[in-house]
Amino acid sequence: MANFDLVMPKMGESIMEATILKWHKNEGDQISVDENILEIATDKVDTEIPSPVEGVITKIFRRENEVVQVGEVIATIQTEVAAPVANGGNGSPPMEEKTALREEEQSKVIVRSVTPKEKNKELSSSGDRFYSPLVRNIAKKEAIPLEELDQIEGSGAKGRVTKRDILAYVEERNAPGPSGVPVQKSLPEEPSAEPVSKIQIDSPKVASGEDEIVEMDRMRKLIAEHMVASKRISPHVTSFVEADMTEIVEWREKHKSLYFEKHGTKLTFTPFFVKAITRAIVDFPGINISVEGDNIIRKKKINIGIATALPSGNLIVPVLKHADHYNLVGLAQMVHDLVERARTSKLKPDEIQDGTFTLTNVGTFGNVMGTPIINQPQVAILATGAIRKKPAVVETEYGDLIAVRQKIFLSLSYDHRVVDGFLGGSFLRRVADNLENFKFDNGI
């Protein structure tokens, strides 16, 4: 018999926590390898996690609706076999080896042993009281010092402060006093030698009876945090170009019925955009990079993220891996599969990470152009507008003529720390040229 600790896997770059939505198994239940054991949610995806081993669940540490940090133990599984080896891809070493997990291994469902001593060292405060990472993060955002945190009465086990406890405290702490200004419950500050100027803050506005106050859901809150972080990290520059899509529109119109009969799905414009982008990245690999401190990381793989609107109104970005390896039909099938599973919350964890460039289509909503925000840690994102008929000057052997053409605006937002106007503008122009001179695959 051997015990394995199931830990919260890493769901993507910059994702450090996830919420347990539902346990499909209970303590004492028998499970098989790859059998779905629980369902989790992050700001990017809701997904089911399969069991990496066969055995019996002896203990569940974290319950439904709890927010859990990546790498934290969530359950113990008793098995008949020894622990899988870390470099085998299915697990991590036994406890006595105490080998640190590599980041790429955390993206999988892995098992790890952590002693109670190690766990307390990671999650306990400087005193004897335990504070979870979530409570610590909330306290940090609300500027609550440890001394003040220690005064909060906890409703959890052994007086532990829960998420509900600290949020209730924050609400009471920021409640308006008699003058209408929030009363901050904090420790007294030592008087400073010099006077400090204070910013005049208006009293909080109270919604009238005609207004409705709706709290952001979990995904919207995290999307908001990522968008603000991206604008803070990257100095955004956006370039625009107009491309002639007439030949692609006519070719698609001619072949879409045959494509549907053969493959059972609609032929959209997205695979054409992805093909044009991958060809441009091959010519301008400086756009396929990321930044880590003072280092530039050149990506060898071309993985295109496709921003997808969900029925809830939120956004998710499934990643098409090795996009440059597919022909047009292959891209069309892959895009359809990813988008459909994204909208039905059936994406796998590794299908929303390791993107190197992102495509978003604002034309779906009838917009002609947009200024998208970079999906960190990437350095560029391209937005496609609506395709519209427009009069345009066409050069012919008989001279210039005015004709009706199918036009589209492309906009590229890029990180000006590492992508200058020459590279960004040249890359965007190449994407437009690839669309205007598209090399159609033979056959559907």
Image (spheres, grey):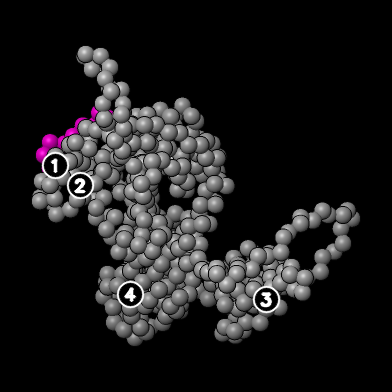
Residue 434 lies left or right of residue 92; in this view the side is left
The residue that label 3 is drawn on is: 172
Q: Nearer the viewer, residue 71 or 267?
A: 267
The amino acid type of the residue labelled 3 equals Glu
Q: Foreground: 330 or 74? A: 330
- Dot 4, how many residues are within 10 Å of its Cα: few (below 14), some (14-19), or many (20+)? some
In the picture, the disc for residue 255 is 1
Rounded to the nearest angstrom, the CA distance separating label 1 from label 3 is 63 Å
- Earlier sequence position, callout 2 versus callout 4: 4
Q: Residue at x 77, y 74 (%)?
A: 178
Disc 4 and disc 1 in contact, CB within 8 angstroms: no
Q: Range of the magenta residues?
A: 435-444
How packed mark 3 is, by other alpha carbons closer than 10 Å (few <14, some 14-19, many 20 or more), is some
Q: Measuring 27% from the left and 58% from the top, which residue is drawn there?
A: 340
Q: Which mark is residue 267?
A: 2
Q: What number is the disc on residue 37?
A: 4
